[in-house]
Image: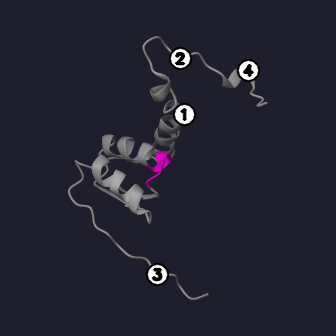
Amino acid sequence: MTNFWRSSIHKLVEGLSEKHGALTEPSAVGVHAVRRANVGAGHSVLIYGAGIIGLSILQPARTTGADKIIVSETSGFRSEILRLRANSLPEIQKVSFHRLPC
């Protein structure tokens, strides 16, 4: 059995699929992150990870006019999703990061 706060449950608007409704919260997190960071035209943005939250930050960062958006991702699968999702980014580079000695 799973417990939820009643205030955390919302009815989807008519016509919105459950699949799209499930993206509402991660999308809100992305928009909030961009607003909180005060991203604007001419800024550079570094996103750690191309998971659902990272991809949800990508679009609002583009919309604000950020000049340079860098997404750091080590997973080949997520990198491929990023490559397909970032079709309007001018260039995707694969960069290797090595562990620094402790």
Mark 3 and mark 1 lie on one chain; the one further toward the N terminus is 1
| Mark 3 lies on residue | 98
**Res. 96 image quadrant:** bottom left
Q: Residues within 10 Å of mark 2 (few under 14, many from 20)?
A: few
Q: Nearer the viewer, residue 101 or 65?
A: 101
Instruction: Quadrant for the C terminus, please.
Output: bottom right
Query: What colouring style does the render use?
Result: one colour
How far is disc 1 from disc 2 in space, using C-alphas? Answer: 12 Å
User: Quick one: SS at disc 4?
Assistant: helix
| Mark 1 lies on residue | 25
| Mark 2 lies on residue | 12
Q: Residue at x 24, y 52 (%)?
A: 89
Callouts 3 and 4 close, C-beta under 8 Å? no
Q: Amino acid at mark 2?
A: Leu
**Res. 74 image quadrant:** bottom left
Q: Nearer the viewer, residue 1 or 28?
A: 1
In the displayed structure, 46 sits above or below 38; it is: below
Callouts 1 and 2 close, C-beta under 8 Å? no
Q: Residues within 10 Å of mark 3 (few under 14, many from 20)?
A: few
Task: Give the mark count.
Answer: 4
What segment is highlighted magenta in the picture? 50-54
| Magenta-colored stretch includes residue 90 | no
Q: Amino acid at mark 1?
A: Glu
In the displayed structure, 40 sits above or below 94; it is: above
User: Quick one: SS at disc 1?
Assistant: helix
Q: Amino acid at mark 3?
A: His
Q: Residue at x 42, y 47 (%)?
A: 55
Q: Residue at x 44, y 18 (%)?
A: 16
| Mark 4 lies on residue | 6
User: Quick one: SS at disc 3?
Assistant: loop
Instruction: Quadrant for the N terminus, please.
Output: top right
